[in-house]
Image: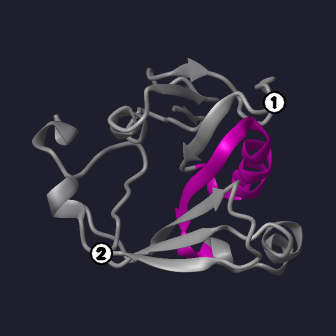
Amino acid sequence: MSCLEPACGRGYMSRPLLEQFGQVVSADMIDYGFGEVRDFLTYPYLAGSHDWVITNPPFKHAQDFIDRAMTIAKCGVAILARTVFLESIGRYEGLFKNNPPTYFAQFTERVPMVKGRLDQKASTATGYAWFVWVKEDVRDFTRLVWIPPCRRSLEKPEDYA
């Protein structure tokens, strides 16, 4: 299957995606030295051109990313976002009311993300979750899924090289 990671930054998500997908196309609107330089919201990606769109979009553009990704993806869309993304009358009316995610996958441990770098010892008070839309699953409700503690088992020494 193919995956598009349209906000790839330095490739911290793209590299693990390569372990699961036959093809990962990585891009970002800023040149971080990884992937193509493209603005996801304006680049002319074809409808249905990738099986999945998986990304951690800029928070203020996340809803626009989801709307665009739903056209580009054949199978589904997954975004990593702060849990607070659930909160907003505007997002409810413009996104969740008529297009609820199939899964809301909440991390049970905090996922430390530090802008612009990897830090093995980082900590955070911010909660993150995966918002996942599976296109063939047309139910009108979201299933809550818990992601058990997994950081230690999934990290590799080369992640921090």
**Residues drawn in magenta:** 57-84
Q: Is mark 2 on a helix, strand or loop?
A: loop
Q: In this view, does 69 lie to the left or right of 115?
A: right
Image vertical order of residue 43 relative to residue 118, above or below:
above
Query: Could you tell me the amino acid type at mark 1?
Result: Thr
Instruction: Tell me, for residue 148, which label it has, or none.
Output: 2
Q: Is mark 1 on a helix, strand or loop?
A: loop
Image vertical order of residue 80 relative to residue 16, above or below:
below
The residue sitting at 37% across, 32% down in the picture is 18
> Which of the pair 25/61 is nearer the observer?
25
Marks 2 and 1, the one that precedes in the sequence: 1
The residue sitting at 37% across, 54% down in the picture is 114
Furthest-left residue in view? 157
Q: Position of residue 71 (x, y in %)?
A: 80, 41
The residue sitting at 52% across, 27% down in the picture is 26
Residue 61 visible in this rendered orientation of the protein:
yes
Dividing the picture into quadrants, the one containing residue 15 is top left
Q: Position of residue 123 (x, y in %)?
A: 28, 68
Cα distance in 3D space between marks 2 and 1: 37 Å
Q: Position of residue 52 (x, y in %)?
A: 59, 41
Instruction: Tell me, for residue 42, which label it has, or none.
Output: 1
> Which of the pair 1/159 is nearer the observer?
1
Dividing the picture into quadrants, the one containing residue 90 is bottom right
Are the residues tagged 2 and 1 within 8 Å (C-beta)?
no
